[in-house]
Image (cartoon, rainbow, N blue to C red):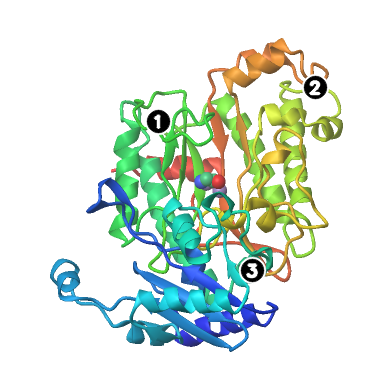
Amino acid sequence: MFESSVYTKRRKELTGNLSSGIVLLPGNEDSSMNYKANTYHFRQDSSFLYFFGLDRQGLAGVIDIDENRSILFGNDAGIDDIIWEGPRPTIVALGEKAGAEGSGSLNELDDFIEQAIVKGRKIHYLPPYRTEKILRIEKWTGIHHNKVIGQASKELIREVVRLRSVKSPGEIAEIEKAVDIAYEMHTVAMKMAMPGVYEREIAGLIEGLALAHGNPVSFPVILSINGQTLHNHYHGNILKDGRMMVTDAGSETDMHYASDITRSVPVGGTFNSRQKDIYEIVLAALQSSAESIRPGVTYKEVHLESAGVICRGLTEMGLMKGDPQEAVRNGAHALFFPHGLGHMLGLDAHDMEDLGEDMVGYDDEVQRSGQFGLAFLRLGRRLQKGFVLTSEPGIYFIPALIDKWRSEKKFNEFINYEKVESFKDFGGIRIEDDILVTEAGCRVLGKPVPKTIAEIEDTMKQRS
Ligand code: GLY
Ligand code: MN
Ligand code: MN
């Protein structure tokens, strides 16, 4: 974790902007897979990590806005805990690491909240995403479990989003470490992408690489020759010549900062001409976004510019027709690019998504569109220096979507369905980088993962 002063400062900045009451930040608990003692890998809650930094089960943080105190609650280890799980620091010692007072009993937290409620104090909490936490909040506050998410504190959410959106140099260094691990995962995957290999052989190995660096992947590995399925977690296909392999994968660091990188490579190591044509368009869309990203621009504009690059490229190839600008305005490109350009990145791969996508990615000025494709843009608002985000344009040929739109005669004026039919066996291509918004523009984070056609072909030749 960072120095204790980092957490003290973050909590001070948080409470400086909240009116009154207490902030309740319960950490995560172990979650069982198939019986109680057989648990998933423990993952601490990201907002708890941001304000208290402590990466273990059984903790809850309270920030008293009016009395300007932070208290860490938890139970000190008993002899049974020590026998099964090993010795651990006392809650007072853990509190010190976070710059907070420690209270070695969770019962005291129950009393603390009860007292606050008796006094009519406001209890600010964030929307819980695990059922166990919904039930704990119901028990503490008396709010019916069906209403717990809806009654989360908007004031607190806004402040947490404001703070977590702008990354400090220490956080940026962590994200770069995560990208460097992703560099290794992706270059190894490229070298393995040969005909006859099962997807799972590569997916398993690169997940193991993340683990070998000490931490799990930042989201389940997406690795498939069916890249047209956007979040494809099936890894049972055998790689075949003529298909692209899309790998969307990243790692966490010790402090749980994430990377989220995608590369698309031709099985066998050499792009055919059709793959080259589509790849160059996606790469141009990514490069155009890197030229536009700077403080003050909205990410919705950047998304639409990248969509314009995709439309122009597909029109030049004869897959689309008509005026590309008009096609983007109408959303015709979403047949090929049905998702958003990117999202915030930080302690979560989709940073702060638990706090509400619209609370993170939109504001009073920029609101989410209802148009198919653009509606899936997770980040639309104006960018600020210190934001870290992904840019991840793609072109996909999704047979079911092509058939649906064609039968509906949708956008016949912009789409050359005759030609699109011949690409139904293509799959998809996505390229994704992790990008820091700087004073002057932006910077792609971490060790550059091979990205141009020449770089990818060259890397794939280096297989042992
Ligand atoms: N890895 C999921 C995404 O890129 O959003
Ligand atoms: Mn991704
Ligand atoms: Mn992403």
| Label 2: element kind | loop
As drawn, 183 above or below 372:
below
Q: Which of marks 2 and 1 precedes in the sequence? A: 1
Q: Which residue is mark 1?
A: 268
**Quadrant the C terminus occupies:** top left
Alpha-carbon neighbours of circle 2 within 10 Å: few (<14), some, or many (≥20)?
many
Alpha-carbon neighbours of circle 3 within 10 Å: few (<14), some, or many (≥20)?
many
Percent coordinates x, y for residue 21 in the rendering: 62, 78
Relative placement, left or right, of 396 versus 77 is: right
Q: Which one is in front, 144 or 325?
A: 144
> Which one is closest to the eye, mark 2 or mark 3?
3
Under 8 Å from ligand 1: the CB of mark 2?
A: no
The span from disc 1 to disc 2 (Cα, nearest Å) is 34 Å
| Label 1: element kind | loop
Question: Disc number at residue 414?
Answer: 2
Q: Residue at x 71, y 39 (%)?
A: 375
> Which one is closest to the eye, mark 1 or mark 2?
2
Relative placement, left or right, of 116 versus 202 is: right
Q: Which residue is mark 3?
A: 156
